[in-house]
Image (tube, rainbow, N blue to C red):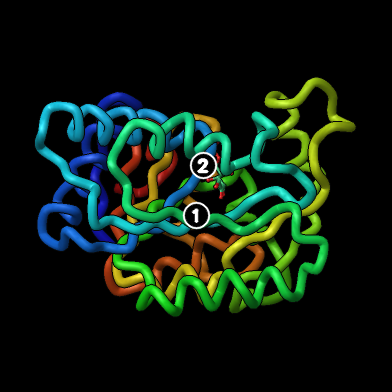
Amino acid sequence: MKIYQTKNYDDLSRVAANLIGAQIIQKPDSVLGLATGSSPIGTYRRLVEGYNNGDLDFSQIRTVNLDEYRGLPRENDQSYYYFMHENLFNHVNIKESHLPDGTNPDSDAECKRYEAVINSMGGIDLQLLGLGHNGHIGFNEPADNFPKYTHCVDLQESTIEANKRFFESIDDVPRQAYTMGIGTIMNAKRIVIIVSGEDKAEIVNKAFFGPVTPQVPASILQFHPDVCLVADAAALSKSPL
Ligand code: F6R
């Protein structure tokens, strides 16, 4: 694992966007796996800047997102579909983008369909990840095993609590989501995980310097051959560097 320690969130966003930008330049028809949440907003802003100043061309880039809330239609401003369009897709010349369809009531069919979409693209060249406070990646919550493929999850209370800031009330936070599995994520050729803030310092230490266990889903990344952890000094403040 390569660790890039940055001064702050801005710096982290610059480094992550440079790593993704390098991927786009080296392989213009890359399949990018993307994340939502607070962590990648600055990275996406930098990628949009790169497109606007002519450094980056997304015309052959295809993307697959990690996850989507179950039950939220695309036009809901809390859907990940909406988030991705607001923060990236509406601002660059992306060729093709995919997310799980949160409105498909047949969860088995939706999970199979999404996994097949990823496979039909030849897999993911670079997967961008954020890290949850409980160690989740995508919506793979702490569990007794590592789920292999795209599946439907019941969100943990701590995740519902963390996400309620985006909804009018906690009752509006969806209780389920579709997410790539740990196996889907681990099949990506390269992984860039971005983590910012002191509130994540404890979990960064557990995930990247502790034992590999499904109780800390991100810890499995220690077994991936090509992971870049891009984290600011605050997020690394409890890690033995
Ligand atoms: C988002 C996702 C989540 C987030 C994680 C961190 O698509 O899959 O795993 O990456 O919850 O969220 P933030 O960045 O908001 O702290």
Report the residue at 60% width, 61% height from top: 216
Pick whichever of labels 1 and 2 is earlier in the sequence.
Answer: 2
Percent x, y of residue 111: 67, 71
Q: CA distance from mark 1 to mark 2?
A: 8 Å
The three-letter code of the residue at mark 1 reads Asn
Determine whether the beta carbon of the residue marked 1 sits less than 8 angstroms from the nearest atom of ligand 1: yes
Residue nearest the observer in this picture, 77 or 180? 77
Q: Nearer the viewer, residue 198 or 55?
A: 55
Residue 195 visible, this orientation = yes
| Quadrant in the rendering for residue 57 | top left
Tell me the residue at 39%/55% (across/down).
96
Question: Which residue position is annotated with label 1?
Answer: 65
Q: Which residue is mark 2?
A: 36
Q: Secondary structure at mark 1?
A: strand
Q: Residues within 10 Å of mark 2 (few under 14, many from 20)?
A: many
In this rendering, would 13 be left or right of 152?
left
**172 up-or-down from 127: above or below:** above
Q: Can residue 232 be seen by looking at this rendering?
A: no
Disc 2 marks a residue whose amino acid type is Thr
Any atom of ligand 1 within 8 Å of the CB at mark 2?
Answer: yes
